[in-house]
């Protein structure tokens, strides 16, 4: 019974709870036990609020028994990255510096999930200050990839990716400033959806770079991601999900986006494109513009905004940052203000140029999510710092620029590499094209079974 | 752009002496990105540009 409940995806669990096939108390108990046992083993858990969650689950079951109208996530247990505030609760942001910080507000997205009936079981591991594509966290320890614990899970929303992939919870909120939803999505075999900048509220969420930060879901299926996005964006992404991709035009940008691509990744992406063609999509090749400029613009905006909010602690508590994290923030102290304003002022025209070059007359662009196989934790933490920095830079090759552009993007699992770690493609659209992205991802998942594969660490077999 | 100038920016303008000590490892990145964006801005940025144009453009793209 426990395994059967854990195997359900988010929409299936929501349906089962709504129909009374599974009580919310049972679903919550299973999730809490698995988070405590498997989640802590994978270092994916920061804090569990057992008592509060079970009280809420009991209330959810009573409401159902009373025959009251049920919201879309009624009684469904979830847990989120430890940077979503709930008034009165600790919210450490993966850091030593904020370890004792208690929020005095509740994030709007958390309030929207509450209103939709979801239960909040606690907070999950992340990279220190949400500042690493691998999930690196020196003080709290590295979370482990459920497909192979020697490998990184992707970050910064590492615990969210681990918890959903290991079937501990069915969905989780994370944030994405340079790929932090798409990295764990790609590396753990999930849909990690970064919405259009500004679509989903970020108030009550620990900031990193206000011009780039996005809140979004990690889930096993496009349908689950659509359900969560519908709630947190307060818009409907489910109605058009089943309309297929016949007639959809998908661009495959070459050049920069193919530069670092490993042969395993290239093969998996080529196969994914074949599937989309068979489903009725038309595929067109395009060419990206000067990505070195876009990456420079992104780095200036991100580091200046991060250095601005971290400056006091960089002065007073520099020893409480991991060197790898501090070294990504501190360059922001060196740029003149004119560069920062220029980077923001160029954003609209550069984004329009990217859309014209990469998407052109099509609906979506299909890129690699991660160009290289998922690295080991050792390859991203030990040895020559230049080699470590190179691997980390390769991981964000296809993701970080999208945040400067502010466009929606999602990782979609499409295979496994020779070492058994997930591979994903990335769908990127024009502003507010989330429905198209989810529709294409849903059609692809309807024709493939990558998202049904279960890692051994989930202990369901 | 000299390393010494950057060190002064960190130490004196930002009052961050620790960061100033670590200037050497950041100089390459900062100089490269600064030059690239400064050049692009001179070439491509209109006089009547604004850092808020992006939000206005995004709002226009929202068909809701």
Image: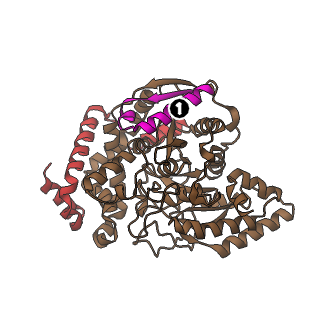
Chain colours: A brown, B red
Q: Quadrant of residue B45?
A: top left
Q: Is residue B53 left or right of residue B40?
A: right
Q: Circle 1 sits on which residue?
A: A271
Residue A1 percent coordinates (x, y): 75, 62
Residue B63 appears in the picture as rendered:
no
Instruction: Relative to A120, say whether A261 is above or below.
Output: above
Q: Chain of mark 1?
A: A
What kind of secondary structure does the magenta stretch mostly adopt?
helix
For label 1, the SS is helix
Locate residue A446, reporting x and y percent.
Answer: 66, 37
Classify 10 Å Cα crowding around label 1: few (below 14), some (14-19), many (20 and above): some
Start-end of magenta stretch: A249-278
Query: Residue at 29% of width from left, 69% of height from top?
Result: A318
Q: Nearer the viewer, residue A109 or A318?
A: A318
A398 vs A46, left or right, is left
The image shows residue A191, relative to residue A159, as above or below, that is: above
- Residue at 36% x, 51% y is A302
* Left or right of A262, for residue A365: right
- Residue A152 visible, this orientation: yes
| Of the pair A363 and A146, the residue shown nearer to us | A146
Q: Is residue A274 magenta?
A: yes
């Amino acid at each position: 019974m426990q395994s059967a409940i854990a195997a359900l995806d988010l929409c299936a669990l929501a349906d089962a709870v709504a129909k009374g096939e599974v009580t919310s108390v049972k679903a919550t108990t299973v999730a809490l036990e698995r988070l405590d046992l498997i989640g802590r083993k994978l270092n994916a858990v920061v804090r569990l609020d057992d008592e509060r969650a079970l009280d809420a689950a009991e209330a959810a079951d009573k409401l159902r028994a009373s025959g009251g109208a049920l919201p879309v996530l009624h009684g469904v247990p979830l847990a989120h990255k430890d940077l979503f505030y709930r008034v009165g609760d600790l919210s450490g942001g993966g850091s030593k510096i904020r370890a004792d910080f208690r929020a005095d507000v509740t994030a709007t997205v958390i309030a929207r999930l509450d209103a939709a009936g979801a239960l909040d079981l606690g907070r999950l591991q992340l990279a220190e200050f949400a500042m690493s594509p691998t999930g690196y966290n020196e003080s709290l320890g590295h979370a482990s990839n459920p497909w192979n614990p020697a490998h990184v899970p992707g970050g910064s929303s590492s615990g969210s990716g681990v918890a959903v992939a290991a079937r501990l919870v069915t969905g989780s909120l994370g944030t994405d400033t340079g790929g932090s939803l798409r990295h764990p999505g790609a590396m753990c075999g999930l849909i990690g959806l970064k919405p259009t900048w500004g679509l989903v509220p970020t108030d009550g969420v620990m900031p990193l770079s206000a011009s780039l930060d996005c809140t979004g879901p990690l889930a096993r299926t496009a349908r689950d991601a659509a359900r969560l996005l519908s709630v947190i964006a307060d818009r409907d992404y489910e109605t058009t999900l089943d309309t297929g991709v016949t007639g959809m035009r998908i661009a495959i940008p070459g050049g920069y986006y193919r530069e670092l691509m490993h042969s395993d990744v290239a093969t998996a992406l080529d196969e994914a494109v074949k599937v989309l063609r068979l489903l009725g999509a038309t595929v067109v090749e395009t060419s990206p513009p000067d990505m070195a400029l876009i990456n420079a613009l992104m780095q200036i905006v991100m580091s200046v905004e991060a250095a601005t909010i971290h400056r006091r602690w960089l002065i007073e508590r520099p020893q409480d940052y991991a060197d790898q994290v501090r070294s990504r923030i501190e360059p922001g102290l060196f740029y003149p203000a004119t560069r920062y304003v220029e980077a923001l002022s160029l954003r609209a025209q550069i984004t329009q140029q990217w859309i014209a070059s990469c998407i052109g007359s099509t609906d979506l662009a299909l890129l690699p999510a991660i160009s290289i196989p998922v690295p080991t934790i050792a390859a991203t933490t030990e040895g020559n710092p230049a080699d470590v920095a190179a691997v980390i830079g390769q991981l964000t090759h296809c993701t970080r620029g999208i945040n400067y552009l502010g466009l929606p993007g999602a990782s979609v699992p499409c295979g496994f590499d020779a070492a058994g770690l997930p591979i994903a493609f990335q769908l990127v659209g024009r502003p507010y094209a989330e429905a198209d992205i989810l529709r294409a991802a849903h059609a692809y998942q309807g024709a493939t079974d990558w998202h049904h594969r279960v890692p051994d660490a989930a202990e369901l077999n | 752009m000299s390393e010494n100038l950057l060190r002064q920016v960190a130490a004196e303008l930002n009052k961050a002496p620790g960061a100033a000590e670590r200037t050497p490892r950041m100089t390459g990145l900062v100089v490269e990105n600064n030059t690239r964006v400064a050049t692009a801005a001179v070439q491509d940025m209109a006089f009547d540009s604004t850092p808020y144009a992006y939000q206005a453009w995004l709002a226009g793209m929202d068909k809701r």
